[in-house]
Amino acid sequence: MRAACDRTRSVGREALKTARPSPSRCRTPSASARRFKGSLAVLQWLGTALTLALSTYVAPGDAAAQVVMEPPVYVEETKSYFTLVTVGNAAMPGLSWHNAYLRARTLTHNGVPGRLAIIPSRSVNDFLRDSFRPKRAVWIGLQYYCHLQKLVWVDGKELSRFEYQNWGPRWNIDGGSPNALHSSQCESGTAAYNPVHYWSVKSGFYWNANGKAKHFADMFVEFPTSKE
């Protein structure tokens, strides 16, 4: 009898009008069972909603921003894919470094989550320059904690002075152009940092530690993986 009830539920409302079984032939779920099923449905809905929210997450300040991602290219040296991503719309022409950091984490390639790119060598630097030829400033995954005088990548590793770096003649310009007159300043506190980006290829493709409030539309995103 239970099977007949289950088959009837699966055929939809129209079938129920003509094929509804007698209530005495079907076991009515208890109140606790109904509450459990209701709670389970809510949890499933929340899980689905959270998944959708994470996959389409828009960081504060870039609501409804358009995302354009160049085809990712694999680099054997780092076992990573790299791409150039542009985020913006008419009302919001760019992202702060922090929002770029959040946005990069929502992007995936072949199931691998992204991050702002780490540049470990001149060969990777030259690869990004020659492959994507950025025409504007581009965020990367590096921060300069000026009160501590430390450079730290987004994976938490400190960049030492013995490792590859690509600074221009002036390394801490505050502005949207290498010709800007002012130097970037850090906020108070040991956690304050200046975000690092590339200048465009035309401007030398050097690193620069800009002001924290600066916004750029482009960012290099890396998808680290051991697979080719």
Image: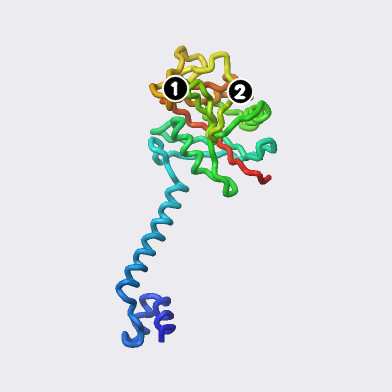
Q: Does the residue at mark 1 contact the one at mark 2 (Cβ under 8 Å)?
A: no
**Outermost residue, left side:** 31
Residue type beneath disc 1: Gly
- 28 with respect to 212 (left or right): left
Q: Which residue is drawn at 54% across and 41% down?
A: 114
Cα gap from disc 1 to disc 2, whole angstroms: 19 Å
Task: Indicate whether 139 appears above or below 36.
Answer: above
The 10 Å Cα crowd at callout 2, few under 14, some 14 to 19, many 20 or more, is some
Residue type beneath disc 2: Gln
- Front: mark 1 or 2: 2
Q: In x, y percent, where is residue 140?
A: 54, 30
Q: If the image is split into quadrants, where does the N terminus sit?
A: bottom left
Image disc number at residue 13: none
Image disc number at residue 211: 1
Task: Indicate whether 44 appears above or below 191.
Answer: below
Q: Residue at x 43, y 44 (%)?
A: 57
Q: In which quarter of the image is residue 28?
A: bottom left
69 or 82: which is nearer to us? 82
Q: Residue at x 33, y 87 (%)?
A: 22
Element carrying mark 1: loop
Element carrying mark 2: loop
Q: In x, y percent, where is residue 199?
A: 55, 23
Q: Quadrant of residue 182?
A: top left
Q: In x, y percent, where is residue 157?
A: 56, 32
Q: In x, y percent, where is residue 51?
A: 45, 52
The 10 Å Cα crowd at callout 1, few under 14, some 14 to 19, many 20 or more, is many
**Outermost residue, top side:** 181
169 or 216: which is nearer to us? 169
Residue beneath disc 2: 165
Q: Which residue is drawn at 46% across and 15% down?
A: 183
Along the polypeptide, which appears first: circle 1 or circle 2?
Answer: 2
- 108 with respect to 10 (left or right): right
